[in-house]
Image: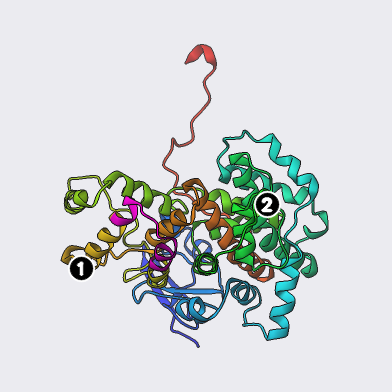
Amino acid sequence: MSNDPLKLTGNGLEVDLPVMEGSVGPKVIDIRKLYAQTNMFTFDPGFTSTGSCESKITYIDGEKGELQYRGYPIEQLAKQSDYMEVCYLLLFGELPTKAERDKFVWDITHHTMVHEQLHRFFSGFRRDAHPMAIMVGVVGALAAFYHDSTEINDPHQRMVASYRMIAKIPTIAAMAYKYSVGQPFVYPSNDLSYAGNFLKMMFSVPAEEYVVNPVLEKAMDLIFILHADHEQNASTSTVRLAGSSGANPFACIAAGIACLWGPAHGGANEACLNMLSEIGTVDRIPEFVARAKDKNDSFRLMGFGHRVYKNFDPRATVMRETAHQVLTELGVDDPLFDVAMALEKIALEDEYFVAKKLYPNVDFYSGIILKAMGFPTEMFTVLFALARTSGWIAQWNEMIEDPTQKIGRPRQLFTGTPKRDYKPLDDR
């Protein structure tokens, strides 16, 4: 659909900027030729008003509180689908037929083992190394083990790398945990689901039989679905930026993991649990709620509101029910969960929170679920990376196939010292 160009006038210039329109969402001003036409460029810290790519994968409407994968609302996928089907959808753009799904699940399941020499790679890390540090190193090192899937211009090799990444990330994540607690690595089981297999690799030990709890398996699968992709966030943009240089897919995903490690991105659910621990008991909630309302107090309620969603986080709506199911199933007696549930009630009813739309977000509920399931807080971001790998891979593939994509090269507004002459040492 054609649109009238946007006229930009000023500084003795008059420029017509093309206006583009996607299938949904706001119109976009095409500024690709702005610098050539005006000798000026835009200033947009954080790129919050800049579209860096064209994508068909994920759509978010923050005002309405909507999240869609390939057009499918996240609520429908969470209720009716599973993570393997969502992975296929993100990669290929359509839901699979039964035959396509069965083959995809078989292929992923039979790629879950990692090269045996990779086991020895872990011994190079200190026992108390953060699992995200291990993830960055080991995932980046996959390129040294799987040379036959690093040629990015070969569609077959790209797909092999994609399958390998989705399949092996749970194995590597579980190995990172087992290494940190001094337990033996657990090999994957081909007779289990993606989520069930991960739970077994995480929590089983050779001395005892491990039976996957179906409630926890479903909760784990749901967490994977809800975190699979989230449009052009910091880590996804990092994967695309790394990929724009022609880097191999394993290096690109390692870069995404490194970005996700930041507390402002993937560490939000861990920060939420730390806040609940700081509150401590239900009777102290009013004190902290008052502090949250005080503009002069630096305290913030973590796990409430969202940078993108100006309404209820659609993922949190789904996760809320699951959190209550998991707590009921496990019968966990922990003061932290009492604090969380009481704080949730206040946030949903208090006029201050409702007016500012500070609803509990997905990090609030996922942190509660993961702690109840027995995951240590340092593994929370690892699980986020595990789930997001499918989205990163889909975004990376889309970028490689985009003929308009160029190597990332943001501009800068230089505010340093202008050109000056060098002075010899004795004259300074």
Residue 32 lies, in percent from the top left, at 53, 67
Extreme residue in the bottom direction: 1
Residue with the mark numbered 2 = 251
Mark 1: few/some/many CA within 10 Å (<14, 14-19, 20+):
few
Asked if residue 336 is among those painted magenta in the image, a careful observer would answer yes
**Magenta-drawn stretch, dominant element (helix, strand or loop):** helix
Nearer-N-terminus badge (1/2): 2
Q: Judge whether residue 144 can be spotted in this image.
A: yes
Residue with the mark numbered 1 = 349
Q: Residue at x 73, y 61 (%)?
A: 164
Q: Which mark is residue 319?
A: none
Q: Nearer the viewer, residue 397 or 226?
A: 226
Residue 124 lies, in percent from the top left, at 69, 35
**Taking 420 as reference, is 415 above or below it?**
below
**Taking 95 as reference, is 201 above or below it?**
above
Q: Judge whether residue 42 can be spotted in this image.
A: no
Mark 1 residue element: helix
